[in-house]
Amino acid sequence: MLKKLFRKKTVAEILEGAADRHDDQGTALHRTLTVRDLTSFGIAAIIGAGIFSTIGKASADGGPAVIFLFIFTAVACSFAAFAYAEFASMVPVSGSAYTYSYVAFGEIVAWIIGWSLIMEYAVGNITVAISWSDYFTGLLSSLRIPFLGIDGINLPDWMTMDYLTAFNGHLQTESLLKAGKSYADLDEATRLANNAWLTAPQISGFHFVADLPALGIIIFITWLVYRGMRESRNASNAMVVVKLAVILLVLAVGIFYVDVDNWNPFAPNGISGVLKGVSAVFFAYIGFDAISTTAEECKNPQRDLPRGMMWAIVICTVIYIAIALVLTGIVRYDRLAVGDPLAFVFEQIDLRLLSGVIAVSAIFAMASVLLVFQMGQPRIWMSMSRDGLLPKSFSRLHPIYKTPSFSTIVVGFVVAVPSLFLNLTTVTDLCSIGTLFAFVLVCAGVLVLQNRTDVQRGKFRTPYINSRYIAPIGFIAAIISAGMFFKAEASSFLFNTPKIKDPTTLITSLDGSELELLGREISNKTAASSTPITDLEAYLSAQSLDQYEKFVAGSALSYEKKYEYGWTLFKHKIPTWIFLSICLIVLYYCIKEQLSLIPVLGLLSCLYMMSELGISNWIGFGVWLVVGLVVYFLYGYKHSKLRRAET
């Protein structure tokens, strides 16, 4: 049975099957896309929620040095793009990483990667839909039309927020109020979440909190994708033109308001602060791989797919770096942790008209991302269905629109329903880890096929650089650097040194009696002060790190309340240990097999970013894969066309 799980499709078999691109009704996909269209799709996917939303939080964490994270992420994605481009040239069909894995690793791995791509596109679209909703509701609230008597259109909070955010915001509000913080001192996001929970309609005690604008945009985009590739292409190209024009306007105007003093310090929170934004920054880049799902709709996929991917990454990286420098130059980095950083920055320098233009363009920008992702997922499902791993209906094409109609409708439901209830942080991290996993396997696939002489090659191949000597030198240099420049962090990691909890985590974990104890300790410490301390969280947050650590160490609170230690701390390091273990395995094969350096770097850099996403995301991703394996063994294994061909 194990051998059957890893049965592979040859490139010749895939190309032979792709030669007849008709479904059961004799309908085929339209070949309409050129390299310009593919580059536009790539820009449409990459320039969206990242530049209009998540770049703010990443800049607040890393300061102006966040540009290095953009560069690192772009380089990592470029390594992966080389691998994608080689496979796309070799196997120019709609399956993307799913089909590539079928060639390199076999059916079970192909299923796993296909299942993870389902999560990538679905969760990615949920993320973008939520961000789009935030901008849309913000735009409505700022709408002023005096002659119509409109002074802002404000939708109820429970109608513009997901269930989890409202619920968690309500719990955090109660904890902070018990700790002495006044309601007015809560941050705006927490107040909105709490208000949404309290004002939401209730059905048998269930609070009906749902993001309805997110639902609306998903329905519209699904209809557009259903209508056809030509309509999707035209809409995408138009939206790309709009957002690039606005971004160039932002740069042209913003550069005159840059104060270089705001770039000092350049990396205020060190490398840890920069790396804290890995998930947000990587999420800004995902989407270029969606281009490969359109292979069967390209006029010349072997030539145009590699070019489209590379051009999209290069153009978008330059834009991201320029925008990050302008944002952190106009406003200090620590003020940028907002949902709409571009609009916020220009409000601060009293350019409200430009701020409004940005808000409008953000709606188009994020809609274009939604379009590309919503277009990619049905084509993955279509490819899996063609191989028998999903029911035939998923590969059915519309007789008039020439699109995978049933898959498109199902994708609409899969994205729309969770977008009503999930929060942005959860879905962003899940989307990132699913995408990175796909990138890792595609890079590994190129390495597996590197020395195979029985594989039919395409017109594009990743440039070969022998890693036999470079990889060991790089590994040794990394160890020496860790020992010299990050000795304390490396020691803490290796010996699992207990870690003090931050003030907010500490406060929200305490019950009533523990809060009273902490309050008395703070009162005793500040007895000479004329102003009594009522906001415990604010007081602790205002202390320097040394003062805070000293106070917590002397507190009578139990050790487990004050520190993370033992298994509770070690479990967060498991992804990093996995990364280090795989580094050693890859190093061995670099020396033994003289692996190509570029896909090795792509594999390791993407795996490193996976390790930065945290154990909870790995667990969530693992659960998703387990569910996928259950589906495979209940349906896919029995109905696989390769299995039926063997019997």
Image: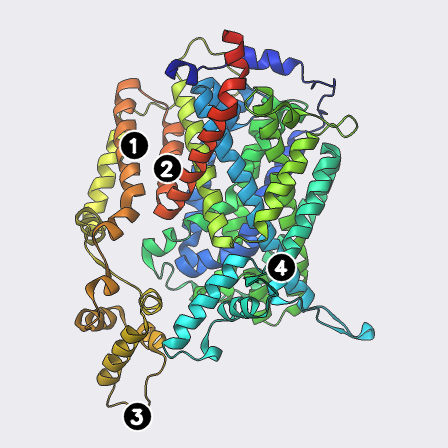
Q: Amino acid at mark 3?
A: Ser
Q: Residue furthest bottom?
A: 530
Marks 4 and 3, Cα distance to the nearest angstrom?
Answer: 44 Å
Label 3 sits on residue = 530
Disc on the earlier residue, 2 or 4: 4
Marker disc for residue 582:
1
Labels 4 and 3: the sequence-earlier one: 4
Dot 1 crowding, Cα within 10 Å, few <14, some 14–19, many 20+: some
Q: Name the one closer to the observer, 639 or 47.
A: 639
- Distance Cα–Cα, label 2 vs label 3: 54 Å
Give the x, y percent position of residue 635.
Answer: 52, 24
Residue visible at 51% across and 54% down in the picture: 424
Q: Which mark is residue 607?
A: 2
Whether residue 56 can be seen here? yes
The x and y percentages for residue 219 are 69, 46
- Do the residues bearing badges 2 and 1 touch, measured as CB atoms within 8 Å? yes
Looking at the picture, tell me which residue is in the foreground, 647 or 584.
647
